[in-house]
Amino acid sequence: MHVKVRALTPADLQPYREVRLESLRLHPECFGASYEAQRQLPQMHFEQKIASQDPHYTMLGAFDGELLIGLCGVSALEIHVALITQMYVKSAYQGYGVGQILIDAAKRIAVAAHQAHVLQLNVFPHNLPAKRRYEQAGFQVAGQTDGELNMVLTLR
C-alpha cells in the first residue's frame, strides 16, 4: 500500500463527509461531536473551511490510490501554535502507519502554513491507543481541560 497525503480541496467534500461521519458513527466516544447532529447539518465546520480554502484551516487526507482513508485537520490556534483535530484512520487501514504519516504531514503543514512552533491536540484519556500513538510521535501531556488531555509537541 502506498499512502499519499494532501490537503483536501472542494472536490473532496463528499469523501470527507463520508469519512468524518463514519468516524463519529463508529467511535462516538473519541470525538466531541455527535453523529446524528453532524449528519443533519447541510455543511459541517471543516466542510465550510475546505470549500472556502480558508488558509487558517487545512484538512489533510490520506489516500490509498483515489480512496480517502484518513483525516487530520490542522488549524492555526494562536500565534505560533497549531491544533490537530479530527484525526481518524478508517478501521481497515489502522495498524499500517497511516496515522503516523498523517501526523508527520501535520507537523510539516503546521510549520509551513501556520508558522507554528508548537503543535497541540486534545484526546480523551480513555482513548489509550490514540494517546500512545501521539506519545510515540513525541507529544507530551501538558494538562487536562473539559475531560480531555491536552498534548503538545515542540516543533522548533
Image (cartoon, rainbow, N blue to C red):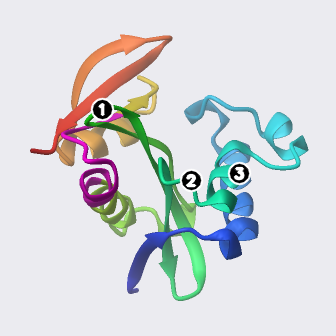
Callout 1: helix, strand or loop?
loop
Q: Earlier in the sequence, mark 3 or mark 1?
A: 3
The CA distance from mark 1 to mark 2 is: 17 Å
Tell me residue 119's x, y (percent).
Answer: 28, 39
Q: Quadrant of the C terminus?
A: top left
Residues marked 3 and 1 touching at CB (< 8 Å): no
Asked if the magenta segment contains residue 99, the reply would be: no
Which range is magenta?
Answer: 107-120
Where is residue 72? Give x, y as percent: 47, 54
Amino acid type at circle 1 is Ile
Q: Residue at x 73, y 51 (%)?
A: 21
Q: Which mark is residue 123?
A: none
Where residue 15 sits, quadrant-wise, is bottom right
Q: Residues within 10 Å of mark 3 (few under 14, many from 20)?
A: some
Q: Is residue 138 left or right of residue 13?
A: left
Image quarter in which the N terminus is found: bottom left
Q: Amino acid at mark 2?
A: Asp
Circle 1 residue? 79
Of labels 1 and 2, earlier in sequence is: 2
Q: State the mark number for residue 48.
A: 3
The percent coordinates of residue 117 (x first, y second) are 18, 40
Give the CA distance from mark 3 to mark 1: 23 Å
Q: Secondary structure at mark 3?
A: helix
